Amino acid sequence: MATQLKPDAAKPPIDCSDEEWTARQELAACYRIFDHMGWCEGIYNHITLRVPGERDAFLINPFGLMWDEVTASNLIKIDGQGNKLSPSPYPVNLAGFTQHGTFHKSLDWAHAIVHTHTTDTMAVCCSKEGLTPTNFYSCFFEGLVGYHDFEGITVRAEEGERLVRNLGNRQVLMLRNHGPVVMGKTIYEMFFLYYMFQRACEVQVKTGALGDPVVVPPEVIEVHQRDRDLMLVDDFGKLDFEAWTRRIDKIDSSWRN
């Protein structure tokens, strides 16, 4: 049975449209899932989601809260310049809106974006070769990954042009010596792409520790990509997102509020 994200109450506890409230609940659920999986770093890093029907407005986590404290109503609505579009007692992290705002503004399709600092994804971002086709998951990302050289903390708007250029037409940007940015046309797609990317990096790091990894030959990768393209449908990742939402709902449903 699909997870129902809208509460029984007829009116959301904050002043917003039904579409925005659903988006808020989905994003809050996503934060809780990432926290449950250990893919967070204290009060830092970000997952953002464009507000439905509003080109230059997106939702971001309140700076200062742990990810297991994020709820639908305390998410902050901001524009690409970091201006608050809804009242909130919390600040917005400068690096968060600079980087995410650039991608949301420049890419019509990038509705959901996540940036993390998990150990394994950072380790691969810090390696010269980057992500290599040495496991089931990493083969999925052949042609979907771009690279951006480290320029320090992403707080300068002028870096945005280079971020977008280095991403190109891909959905993952590996910030060298830093961490990954993963984007999706929906929150479901972003979530499951990140899930697989995290797994790809975990396996690559552990395989590297063993030494002498087996590289998948190009002809097999081509078949893998052909099958991948059949998977990338409009509801890609939705069943996975709903399943994990049911899991975190059993643990703590306060994200819904």
Image (spheres, grey):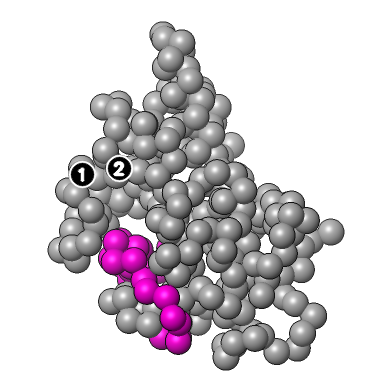
- Labels in figure, total: 2
* Residue displayed at 45% across by 24% down: 204
Label 2 crowd bin: few (<14), some (14–19), many (20+), radius 10 Å: many
| Rendered-image quadrant of the C terminus | bottom right
Name the mark on residue 150.
1
Mark 1: which amino acid?
A: Phe
Q: Is residue 106 magenta?
A: yes
Residue 56 versus residue 138 in the image, above or below: below
* Residue displayed at 50% across by 59% down: 66
Part of the protein shown in magenta: 85-112
The percent position of residue 219, horizontal first and vertical second, equals 47, 22
* Residue displayed at 61% across by 79% down: 21
Instruction: Say which of 94 and 185 sits in front.
Output: 94
Residue 204 versus residue 10 in the image, above or below: above
The percent position of residue 251, horizontal first and vertical second, equals 74, 54
Check disc 2 and report the residue beneath it. Answer: 178
